[in-house]
Amino acid sequence: MRASASVLHLDLDAFFASVEQRDKPSLAGRPVVVGGVGGRGVVATASYEARALGVHSAMGTGQARHLAPHAAYLATRFEAYRESSRIVMALLGELSPLVEPLSIDEAFVDLAAGGRDTSPEALAALVEGLRREITERTEGLHASVGVGSSKFIAKLASESAKPDGSRIIAPGREPDFIAPMSVRAIPGIGPATTEKLSRLGIRTVAELREASPRELVRELGRAVGEYVHGIAFAQDDRPVAPRGEAKSISVEDTFEQDITESAAVAEVIAADARLVAVRLARAGLFARTVTVKARMADFSTVSRSRTLLGATDHPERIAAVAQGLAGAIDPRGGVRLLGVGVSNFTQAAQEELFEVDDAEPAAGRLVRHDEAAPSVTVRHPEAGFPPGMDVEHDEWGRGWVWGSGHGIVTVRFEHRGGPVGPVRSLRADDPLLHRAGLLPLAAAVPEDDEDDGHGPGWARRMRDLGAARVPSEDARPSPGESARTVHN
C-alpha cells in the first residue's frame, strides 16, 4: 500500500451496451442486451435499463428474454468496441507510462509513474477532467473512476462509484472504507471460501479483521489464510504493470465431492463455456481452439482440444465444441475438476463456412476437425445480417439490422448523431442492401498507434488547468481459493 492515492482504476459503464445506445439513437434509454442472440446464447453486457429488469452478464439469452422481453437483443460489434477502447487507452497513456489493461473496457493507471500531483484537489480535477474527455472523445460514453493507495482500493472505489461516478479514497481511510463490505469484495474469495468463512461467523471485512490469523490459516490453508487476513487491513502492494497478450482464457470448477454422472459433466461444461465466452467477449478476441480439461479421482488429468476451421466468439459454438470434447470423458470413476478453455486468438472473426455437428457418438469418440462431418449446417441468406449489424441501402441510406428471418431483414435507418429513423423490412437478397463499415469517431486512434500512449493534447490542457504535470518525453492475482477459477 502506497503513502499516496496514486493508483487509478477506470471502468467503462455497461460498455458494449453503451456503444450500441450511442450508435443507435432509437435505443437511448432503452434496455439493451448484447451477446449471443440465439436460444443458447449468453449475455455479454446488459445496459443499466436491462439490469434493472434482472438481466446480467453470463446469463443465458433465453432467460434474459423472459425477464426483459421488450429489450433490444444485439449481436456483438467488436470493431466498434475496439475503436472506443483505443481512444480511452490512449487517454490513459497520457497520464502515465504504466497502464495495465484488464480487458477492453477496464484498466489500472500508476499516476505516480506519470509524475502526477496526487494532492486531493489535483486528483479531483484530474479525475473529472479525464471523465469529461472520455465522454467527449467517445461521443457519449461514460466511465466510473476510482483512485486509492493500491489496486485493491482503487478498484473497489470505482465499483462503489458506478454508474458514471468517481471516488477517491484518501490514504489512511482505506480500513474504514472496506470494513462494511462483504468478504466477497476481496479478490480471490469465491463461493467456497465464502462458505468456510461464513461457518466461522465471518461475513464482512470488519469481522475478518477480528478473526485470529491462526484460525484463518487452519481453516483456509496458509497461503489463503495469510492473504485474506492481510488484505482485510487493505495491505496490497501489487504493482501496476502492462500485461502481456493473453494466451488463453479458461474457467475451471473443483468439486467438494467427485461427480460421476454424464449429465452433471454436461451441465458444468455448459456453464463454464458460457463464462469463457463472456470473458472472451470482454477481451475483444476470437478463438480458434477449444479445450476441455478433467482431473479424475485418481488425480490423472485428461485434456482434449479441437482447432476450428475459423475463429469464433459465439458462446453456443464454444459450448457445442466443448460438449463434444467432453463426450470422451468417462465420469464413472469420479471427476474432481472440470474446465473449459479457449486459445489461439485472433482479433477478427473468421467464419466457418460449414459447422460440424459436435454431438458425440455414444462411445465417446472425438470428432476431429479434419474428419468428415456427420452433418453440415448450411447458413440461410439472412444469417449474414445479425441484429445490430451496420448496413447501408442504396436508396434508404445507412442503418442497422433490427432482426431477420424467413428471408426478410428488418432495418432501422438511423446512425450516431442523427435523429431516430424509420424502420423498413427488406428482402434478404435485396441487391441494394449491403453490410457497412463503421461510422468513424472523430477522435479515433489508428490501430497501429494504440500502444504509443499519447493522445492529441488532453494532458497538455490538464496541465494548463493546473491539475497535473506532464512528464518529459523521456520519462517513461493474488492468492485465493474458489470453487470456480477464471484464468487468462
Image (cartoon, rainbow, N blue to C red):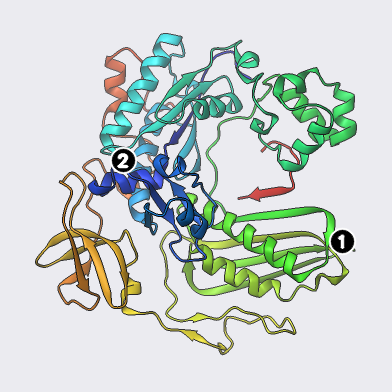
Disc 2 designates what residue? 29
**Are circles 1 and 2 on residues that touch, CB within 8 Å?**
no
Residue at left offset 32%, top offset 25%: 459
Secondary structure category for the residue under label 1: loop
Tag 2: Cα neighbours inside 10 Å, few (<14), some, or many (≥20)?
few
The amino acid beneath tag 1 is Phe
- Going by the picture, which residue comes out furthest to the left? 395
Kindly identify the residue that appears in the image at 74 percent across and 64 percent down. 264
Amino acid on which the number 2 mark rests in the picture:
Gly
Residue 170: percent from left, percent from top: 54, 12
Residue topped by disc 1: 299
Question: From the viewer's perspective, is residue 293 above or below residue 204?
Answer: below
Residue 36 in the image: state x and y as whole percent.
Answer: 46, 61
Residue 48 coordinates in the image, percent (x, y) = 42, 39
Residues under labels 1 and 2: Cα distance?
Answer: 52 Å
**In the image shown, does 134 or 71 lie closer to the viewer?**
71
Residue 440 appears left or right of 195: left
* Foreground: disc 1 or disc 2: 2
What quarter of the picture does the N terminus occupy?
top right
Instruction: Report the side of 352 relative to 80 (left or right).
Output: right
Please determine whether, in this image, residue 460 is positioned above or below residue 351.
above
